[in-house]
Amino acid sequence: MSNLLTGAEIVFKVLEDQKVNHIFGYPGGAVLPIYDELKNHKSIKHILVRHEQGAGHAAEGYARSTGKAGVLLVTSGPGATNAVTALTDAYMDSIPLVCITGQVPTHLIGTDAFQECDTTGITRPCTKHNWLVKDINQLSTILHRAFEVATTGRPGPVLVDIPKDIQFKKGKYLKPKELKNNKEKNVVRLKLDDNDIETAVQYIKKSSKPILYTGGGVINSGPKATDLLRELAAMTGFPITSTLQGLGAFPGDNNQFLGMLGMHGTYEANNAMHDCDLMINIGARFDDRITGKLDEFSPKSKKIHIDIDPSSINKNVKVDLALVGDVKFILEKIISSIKKQDSNFLNSNKQKISSWWSQIEKWRQKNSLGFVNSKEIIKPQYAVQRLYELTKAQDTFITTEVGQHQMWAAQHYKFNKPNRWMTSGGLGTMGYGLPAAIGVQVAHPGKLVIDIAGEASVLMTMQEMSTAVQYNLPIKIFIINNQYMGMVRQWQELLHEKNYSESYTEALPDFVKLAEAYGCVGIRASKPDELDSKISQMLSVNKPVIFDCVVDKMENCYPMIPSGKAHNQMLLGEQDKKDKISDEGKILV
Amino acid sequence: MNKSAYSFSTSKQKIEDHIIVVWVDNESGVLARVVGLFSGRGYNIDSLAVAEVDKKKNISRITISTSGTPQVLQQIKLQLGKLIPVHKVADFPRNKKTILREMALLKVISSKTKLEKAEKLCKKYKFTILDKTEKSFILEISALKKEIDELIKKLQPLGLASASRTGVVAMMKGSEIYQQH
């Protein structure tokens, strides 16, 4: 029959019908038939990475900056196991990925064949769902379903494992429309009771100390959710704080924004969380880096939790009102209900929350993100601030690695749009930022993409510079180089009597020469007065750049909620720490 | 001293026993997904019973006896509900509205007098002798877990040689069936 296609052809038919333009991957024995077919599909561009973990993070960066699913294609065995970190990272941060893996031929499965591993077994706990394709006639159905599962409900990674014989076999192709959609599990229907919306509005009207606590769910819900969040903030005048993942949903330079909350959040945000009488959690999950000590978390507040994932409700913190569904639907309902009841709520409620705002202003006076600058040595906070000032006029995309630099970036770089901030929050994956920047740049040619990095993290996936050079992706790797695993060193200083066990890197490469070896541009800045000109130089280069920003080795990241403490017991800086870290606290961090 | 990177658990809720029933697509790997969820998130499985119950619709019914705080039990149900091959999840209360049964095969090998004694001892329970020789018998018993526990304890001094148990299964009494709400 002429309308039968090979498995490899079906893979590309699905990618075309799912409007996929880019895939990130690495070939190998068990995916060769798919790679052989690549040449016949001009609308799909393959980006060859240098390690499968890089393919995964690049696909994550692509997904986060576009809102579409990121796709990666890797081989069996080590190809699949190398992708596991990225899949777990995407699972923790709710990022839609479709990972296609090759597998040894069906008849060899279970025989410990060359490059065989139990891919679906290994990835079961780090994907929303995975499939081993055993029947060629199931292939298109499974692949379409994979895209649906990845992108609907709470997004996340999925994996489809395709044995090599299935890639050669011929079978029927079904378009997405032709599939029997027997289940709608992922399309979370709004089963909301109008009474619940009404209760939420009553809470809002009664509150004199409210706060909006927003998270990555707002970004995942799409641009409309961001618009609605801004509308809700504008019409209520409520203060608003954000998790690490939610940055950009609300403008960072707006006066209603209190900055990020949590372990390294601002004094005003954490104190407002602690003292509020109404907390409206919009698409965040009460993560332990946010709540601090659970039984002292915001003791006096009524809590509303908006989340698309019912299992997020009451998982860590018990709430008074749960609104399960897509952020944009729920915000729309709340907004229209407030409007109906009081068309000028902002002004009529102003008086009620005015003393709350004066309290917040008092907390703000502490200037908790302040630091002592230096003329001799570059302070890492100063580096991020200068980077922000010199790039804020452009539409800039920022990725990060994990550690102190990540927190300084979150504190000092201000985001005004969603999908501009890509960072590994849940899993905390060092080595995330460089490949993620590659994915972002692939999706947004011509835009400025910067990885704010640490020198330890970036060495974990440094090989991907070669990918950036191959595809002319002018990403900027801005390394805050303090020669230490800074966050590890900071905890060792505060909690392990300055025993800096294995957190200093003795033999770092010369990053400028390394850049040149990769065929990109290396720049070094070590004095505060040369920083601006060097950053401008970096921005003027239309090539990948590794920027070695040599900073103060011993700077710590403040403010900080110390171990075992509540939101209102923050450390503000060096002076503060002697009094506040108790012996019991040390074992809790 | 514990230098954990996270805070101590401060939960002081009471541990409860529950029967969780899950209807799933009967496909390869589905049981691994369910039990992997339990082990991965640190939930308990006290017993497990699985079999296909609807061939046409390809549905299996998994009955899990578990224990945990109310918050953990709530999480178990919600997390199970998120698995793609799961159709519905039910929490069967351990009360008069629920029938609970476990089946066991017990083999006793002993002298004639002890065998007689053993058989007499079983009279109290509903049982069937499935196999009998001069030196042994195999009985089948269907009862509550604690009754089987009790019987096993009594048969041990009388030559109980082998015990095979199914794990608990559950069903609601009356004309109602469980509907997902």
Image: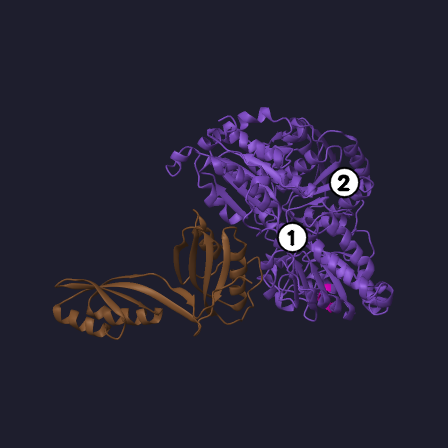
Q: Amino acid at mark 1?
A: Gln
Which chain is tinted purple? A
Residue A526, picture quadrant: top right
Point 66% across, 35% down: residue: A438
Colour theme: by chain
On the image, numbered disc 2 is attached to which residue? A396
Q: Point out the frontmost of discs 2 and 1.
A: 2
**Side (left or right) of A231 relative to A164:** right
> 10 Å neighbourhood of mark 2: few (<14), some, or many (≥20)?
some
Mark 2 on the same chain as mark 1: yes
* Magenta residues, start to end: A273-278
Secondary structure at numbered mark 1: helix
Q: Earlier in the sequence, mark 2 or mark 1?
A: 2
Q: Amino acid at mark 2?
A: Thr
Question: Could you tell me if residue A249 is visible in this image?
Answer: no
Residue sitting nearer the eye, A246 or A265: A246
Chain of the residue under label 2: A
**Side (left or right) of A456 relative to B96:** right
> 10 Å neighbourhood of mark 1: few (<14), some, or many (≥20)?
many
Residue sitting nearer the eye, A11 or A316: A11
Display colour for chain B: brown
On the image, numbered disc 1 is attached to which residue? A490
Question: Could you tell me if residue A232 is visible in this image?
Answer: yes
Residue A147 lies in the magenta-colored region: no
Residue A274 lies in the magenta-colored region: yes
